[in-house]
Amino acid sequence: MVTPPQNIRIGTSGWSYDDWDGIVYPAGSQVDRLAYLAEFFDTLEVNSSFYRAPAATMAASWLRRTPGRMDFAVKLHRRFTHEWTAPYTRAEVDAFRRGIDPLCQGGRLGALLMQFPWSFRFDEPARLWLDQLARDFRRYTLVVEVRHRSWEALEAVDFLRSHRLNLAAIDQPDLPGNLPPVPVATGQVGYVRLHGRNRQQWFTALRKEQETAPERQAARDARYDYLYSPEELLQWLPRIKDLAGGTERTYVFANNHPRGQAVANALQLRSMLLGQKVPVPEPLLNAFGFLRQIAQGTGRQGTLF
C-alpha cells in the first residue's frame, strides 16, 4: 500500500457495521471485517470503546489481525466525555488504560480521541474537566473533538494548545451553534473527522432521548447518513495538507458510515491525495459505480489491488 504524502493517514470511524455486508464486505461471507478493511487503509478509528471499555485481549487481537503498518485511534469511553456531572474514579481510568495497553506496547496507538457532545461548551467547568483528563491520560496522544461554536474562540484554542491537547477539525452541517471547520494544529498531531452534512437529521438524536434504545440508535445513524461529493471532498484537501505540514502526522477519518459511504469517501480522499488510483473492495464498486474511476485493476480474490 502506498502512503499518502506528508504522513497523512486515512481510514474510517469503525468497521463493524452490519449494513456494510454486501456493500463493503462480500455478501454472505464470514470474512474478518477488520483484517479485510486493513487491506485498504493504514489506520482505523475504534468506535466500540465509546460504549464499552475494550478488554486487553480484544486490543491484542486487533494487532494480530492487522499488518504492522496499521495503527489505531481509540475513542475514550463515554464515562469521561458525556457524563461529566459526577467525577470519575481512578479505578475507571485504570480499567480503560489496561484495555488499550496492548496497542501502546505494540506501538500502534496513534491517538486517544475524547469526543464531546454539542452541549459541552467552552466554560470554566469544561476547562476544569479537560484539565483533569489531560493529567489522567497524559501518557497518550490526546485529541479533543468538540462540536459547539464556543470552541472557535482564540482563548479556547490557546487553552487546548497549553494543555497539549490536539483539536480535531470536524466537518458537520452548518447549523446555528455548530463549530465550523477549525483546521488548526494545537499539538503534534492533526486530526480530521468527516461526519457528513445531513442538516435535516443532525439534531434528531437529541430529540429522541425519551425513546427506546433502538429508536435512539436509528436516529444517531441517520445523523451520519450522507455521501460527500467530489467537490466537497476537494474543499478539505488544502486543510488536510496544511495540518500535515505543521504536525508530525495527520489522521483523517470518515464517519458517514451508513451503507458504506464512509469507505467510499475515504478511498476517494486517498486517491486525491496520492494523485493516482487506489485499491477498492470489489463489492463497493457495485454500490458506488463512480469509484471505478479511481480503482486499480482487479487482483486476487476479486478485490482490487
Image (cartoon, rainbow, N blue to C red):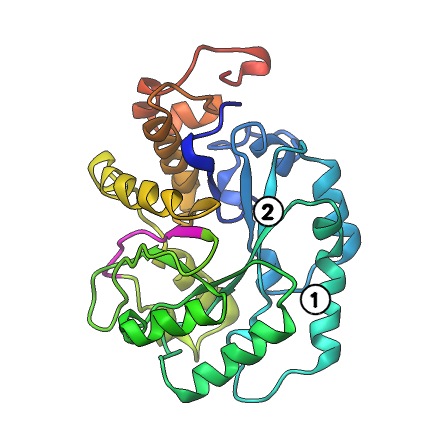
* Magenta stretch encompasses residue 83: no
Residue under numbered circle 2: 72
- At a point 24% along the width and 73% down the height, the residue shown is 177
Of 92 and 108, the residue lying toward us: 108
> Pointer 1: residues within 10 angstroms few (<14), some, or many (20+)?
some
What distance separates the C-alpha of mark 1 from that of mark 2?
15 Å
Q: Which residue is mark 1?
A: 96
Which label's residue is closer to the chain start, 1 or 2?
2
**Which residue occupies the foreground of this view, 9 or 242?**
242
Q: Residues within 10 Å of mark 2 (few under 14, many from 20)?
A: many
Q: Position of residue 1 (x, y in %)?
A: 53, 23
x%, y% of residue 266? Answer: 40, 37
Secondary structure found at label 2: strand
Q: Position of residue 52 (x, y in %)?
A: 65, 64
Q: Quadrant of residue 240?
A: top left
Callout count? 2
Is 235 placed left or right of 253 in the picture?
left
Side of 172 where 64 appears, left or right: right
Question: Which region of the structure is painted magenta?
Answer: 190-200
Q: Amino acid at mark 2?
A: Phe
- Residue 122's quadrant in the figure? bottom left
- Vertical side of 84 occupied by 108: above or below: above
| Label 1 element class | helix
Q: Residue at x 31, y 18 (%)?
A: 293
Q: Which mark is residue 108?
A: none
Establish if 242 lies above or below 89.
Answer: above
The structure residue drawn at horizontal position 62% and vertical position 60%, both measured from the top left corner, is 140
As shown in the figure, which amino acid type bears the numbered disc 1? Phe
- Residue at 65% in and 45% down: 108
